[in-house]
Amino acid sequence: MTGATAPAGRLPRQVPYIIANEACERFSFYGMRNILTPFLVSTLLLFAPEAQRAGIAKDVFHTFVIGVYFFPLIGGWIADRYFGKYHTILWLSLVYCAGHACLALFDEEPRGFYAGLLLIAIGSGGIKPLVASFVGDQFDQSNKARARVVFDAFYWTINFGSFFASLLMPIFLRRYGASVAFGIPGLLMLMATVIFWSARHKYVRIPPSGPNPDSFLHVVRAALLARAPGQGRPGLNVAIIGFALAAGSLTFVGSIGVVAALCLALVFVMALGGAGAWMQLDRARGAYSPEAVDGVRAVLRILIVFALITPFWSLFDQKASTWILQADTMAKPDWFQSAQMQALNPALVMILLPFNNLVLYPALRRFGIDPTPLRRMGFGIAFSGLAWIAAGVIQLWIDGGEAVTVTWQVLPYALLTFGEVLVSATGLEFAYSQAPASMKGVIMAFWYLGTTVGNLWVLLANAAVRNDAVIARIAATGLSEAAFLMFFFAAFALVVAALFGAYARHYPMQDHYRST
């Protein structure tokens, strides 16, 4: 481990560099992400029939987001096993910058533009689990109380960058064109990289663990393959079913697309492989230490939490696609761009984070209610469902022919943002604190993989409503396709929020901050 630790109880002096890096990086990411859907509809997808452009744009957007939140798996693994967090963040940041350059240079060339999206997905996704985890590495038991405040500040900074990006980039896109609108976020990403590099001698750098004979996958494989006298291997059978379903999901490439099919295959492998390993995990104790086996059990518990949060991401990320397309049909001033409504989200986050920490949570504690991380996340999922009920009611007004002003979207944005603060800001610290020391990068990657799965649910839902039988059923309800999907996702979130609450009651909290 390199770098100097902070005096007991003090804020490490290197943390502001990481936070400044994150502010610039988030401006760059949200700056391009929040104008992606309107750019696709108005410019890059002009070859498609007008009635199909919105659907194609949603598919492109959510496929991109799936990539962004899939590559954390690779970035976390590389950092934990080979290069460490610092070098992995630095090198992938350069890939990230190259992706932004492609967007600015190839704004009229689809292949070059999509190559840029791929590079951004690799760079942004690869560093995503590492930056938050790298923040945690700068703390130990003596100042971990400060870490919880810094994680909130970290999330506040993310939204500071997102606010200005959401407000300004739609204006630049309209006035100066796509090259400028995508080029400015690229310059901010370059600035983020320089800031991060400039504090290279100040960081606490925990070296990569290298190949681990007691790794998660090794223990899982041993548990699945081990035999017990007089017993079968039911867990292995469950895992085999998962692999079979994964192979079967690849046959749906033609109807749901390559990315969605691959992600669905991954979900089957992880869900049923993990369930099978849980069923036989004690069988690995002969080949591996009790600590290694207990560590795998802890990880599997964490993954259940992450899985139950995926519906939240289904709802949250559609504010940059479905809600923008809804705003396009609403009454608004000529100077106002639909994508600018997204600035409301980070603005509310910057208000709600200090409000929750200074007012709401202390008030709840005075009434004897402890707002534990799991309780906060459960209620956050529920609030996202309420947000989509509000959006669905607005869509009913629009479908009924009313001239609905875009200011009505403030209500669903407010509800969704409150849910976001409860889920996402809390989840960053939860994921780090629950992860065993040797797997922090990978666990953070699994946290972000939840967003990939959430966007997978969106792609599957969008693919389903292209089926004639499904379209007929939706028509029989008297709802438009847009309104039906909004109420569907709301119900999805509310049901899972109830399941999350039931599971959270029995989850054993851990404390995995380093001792020194």
Image (cartoon, rainbow, N blue to C red):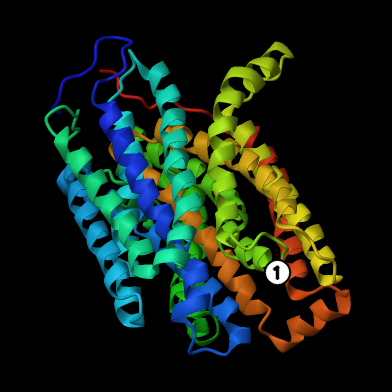
> In the rendered view, does 326 fall on the left or right side of 177?
right
- Observer-nearest of 411 and 359: 411
Q: Is residue 326 left or right of residue 149?
A: right
Q: x, y percentage for residue 350?
A: 53, 34
Residue drawn 23% across the image and 26% down it: 14
Q: Quadrant of residue 50?
A: bottom right
Picture residue at 67% right of the left edge, 43% below the top: 414
How many neighbours does mark 1 have within 10 angstroms: few (below 14), some (14-19), or many (20 or more)? some
- The C terminus is located in which quarter? top left
Q: Position of residue 29 (x, y in %)?
A: 38, 54
User: Where residue 342 appears, x then y in whole percent?
Assistant: 56, 52
Q: Which residue is mark 1?
A: 329
- Indicate the amino acid at tag 1: Thr
Residue 490 picture quarter:
bottom right
Q: Quadrant of residue 64?
A: bottom left
Q: Is residue 136 above or below residue 346?
A: above
Q: Position of residue 65 (x, y in %)?
A: 45, 62
Which residue is pictured at 35% across the width and 55% down the height? 125
Eyeballing the image, is 275 above or below 20?
below
The reply to whether residue 452 is visible in this rendering is yes
Q: Nearer the viewer, residue 256 or 120?
A: 120
Query: Camera-side residue: 433 or 322?
Result: 322
Q: Is residue 454 above or below residue 214?
A: below
